[in-house]
Image: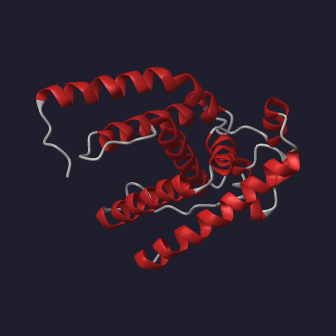
Amino acid sequence: MEPPLTPDTTNQRDNDITATVMRERTRLVNFIRRRIRDPNDAEDILQDVFHEFVQAYRLPAPIEQASAWLFRAARNRIIDRFRKKKEEPLTDLSSADDDDASHEYRLDLALPAHDAGPEALYARTMLLKALQDALDELPPDQREVFIAHELEGRTFKDMAMDSGIALNTLLARKRYAVLHLRARLQSIYDELDL
């Protein structure tokens, strides 16, 4: 059980929020702008993500991996925006290069809209929690590749050059990660009847 919030813990959480926003803003802006043409839409998404982050961070159980959470939230907002506007194909969102255009390398997480009412917000929260738990279950090498590609937007070619790990090895790690995440999240989708 979480300890009750005191003015000191509230101030510390506010300081943590500010530090995280300052640290991640530039990377997050670049991530969003690579996927959204209109600068105003990109700024709207950024503000929505930060607003959602502040709300989520102030819940009794704070966010453990703030950076990963922010990029996941941004990606989900971008997907939501594309679903509404239908102006660009969704494959541009999950694929930073052509090496992984195949379905087996994409998670394609379908989240209820954040503003679709309390039941949808509950389902969204449960799915995001299940995703975080499933990510934590992955072997570190699979988790790192998945986060770098899906959340940070890095290409497999760049990761291979930086790490010295063969491209096919990175692709296999991502594929195993996606298969595990799909299997774990399917039960949540079934439970929530989505």
Residue 136 sits above or below residue 130 on the image: above
How many marks are shown on the rendered structure? Answer: 0
Residue 58 sits above or below residue 187 on the image: above
> Of all residues shown, which one is farthest toward the front?
139
Left-right relation of 111 to 169: left
Residue 24, percent from left and from top: 51, 26
Q: Residue at x 49, y 34 (%)?
A: 46
Q: Quadrant of residue 192?
A: bottom left
Q: Residue at x 45, y 56 (%)?
A: 128
Q: Residue at x 74, y 48 (%)?
A: 92
Left-right relation of 167 to 192: right
Closest to the observer: 54 or 183?
A: 183
Q: Residue at x 21, y 25 (%)?
A: 11
Residue 29, percent from left and from top: 57, 28
Residue 56, percent from left and from top: 33, 44
Residue 182, percent from left and from top: 61, 67
Closest to the observer: 87 or 28?
A: 28
